[in-house]
Image (tube, rainbow, N blue to C red):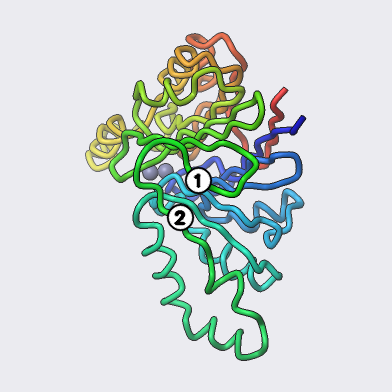
Amino acid sequence: MDKLSVLMLGTGSPRPDLERAGSAQVLFIDSLPILIDCGEGTTAQLMKAGIAPEKVNHLWLTHLHSDHVLGYGQFLLGGWAMGRRKLTVVGPVGTKKFHETILGMFKEDIDYRTSLGRPSNGVLDVNVIEVDEAGKVECDLPANVTAEHMIHNVTTLAYRFDVGEKAVVFSGDTAPTPKLVELAKGADILIHDACLSTNVTYKNPSNPELQKIWTELQKEHCTPEQAGETAREAGVKQLILTHFLPNIDVEKAFCEAAEVFAGKVIVGKDLEKIEVK
Ligand SMILES: [Zn+2]
Ligand SMILES: [Zn+2]
């Protein structure tokens, strides 16, 4: 029986935060690490957790917003420097262009390093798979993966990983949607966007710019309560909230979700590991 666990690498948002790195999680199938999103600081977070970046050969991107991909350059090139020779990247349409843009930006750098004798495998031959339609994703993982489109301001995919009888679901960034309820049906763990947790940054009514952003965010993210409702309707066992702006009220986020969802609620912290029981 495969053991499943989730490591929260980065539980932050686009706003720089010393306590929360950019969005990233690791799903472990036994000891096989699958990186989900690659926000700023991902490579350092992997190392802090004792995971060698070069041993991570699978990356799945939910979408191409900066807070989910800013760590990709370092993950790609740093991991290659440390000896990674094989990498598969799965993501929405646009992922190939994004990857090729990074390669283009650092062409001289890569050319120099290969001229010193480093093989180009692991950087110039990355297997990039774009997911266009919802449904089963063909991949070489020991899991059945299903993708579904979420509600955000760019194309965003949620992923469900089924391994034997167990399932883990990553929402990506989204407003509430019945599609996520459907995708997460009966899952053991749902990792869910709770960007709209009460926080000090957007509590200044005298700043109209922040007010406008906060209003817009309601259309493309969730409150802890909305995350809890999705977890309840889907009948998941554990709900992990993530994607927090700086200085959220952790207790309040927990209570809001726990009030509507009777299963286990975890307000995600960087480097916290959660096992599927
Ligand atoms: Zn986003
Ligand atoms: Zn985001």
Element at label 1: loop
The residue wearing badge 2 is 129
Percent of width and height locating residue 157: 40, 40
Q: Amino acid at mark 2?
A: Ile
Neighbor class of circle 1 (other Cα within 10 Å; few <14, some 14-19, many 20+) is few
Depth order, front residue of 275/244: 275
Judge whether 269 appears above or below 41 on screen.
above
Closer to the chain start, of discs 1 and 2, is: 2
Percent x, y of residue 94: 35, 57
Of labels 1 and 2, the one closer to you: 1
Q: Secondary structure at mark 2?
A: strand
Residue 244 shows in the view:
no
Viewer-closest of 142 and 160: 142
Residue type, mark 1 in image:
Glu
Label 1 to label 2, Cα distance in Å?
9 Å
Q: Which mark is residue 85?
A: none
Between 88 and 221, the residue placed more toward the observer is 88
Could you tell me which residue is drawn at 40 percent across and 62 percent down?
A: 96
Q: Could you tell me if residue 218 is visible in this image?
A: yes
- Residue under label 1, please give it: 138
What's the residue at 37%, 37% (across, down)?
A: 134
Percent x, y for residue 74? 56, 65
- Give me the residue at 28% from left, 42% from top: 153
Q: Nearer the viewer, residue 227 or 80?
A: 80
Question: Disc 1 vs disc 2: Cβ atoms closer than 8 Å?
Answer: yes
**What percent of the width, then of the height, locates residue 54?**
69, 62
Can you say which quadrant of the picture contains the C terminus?
top right
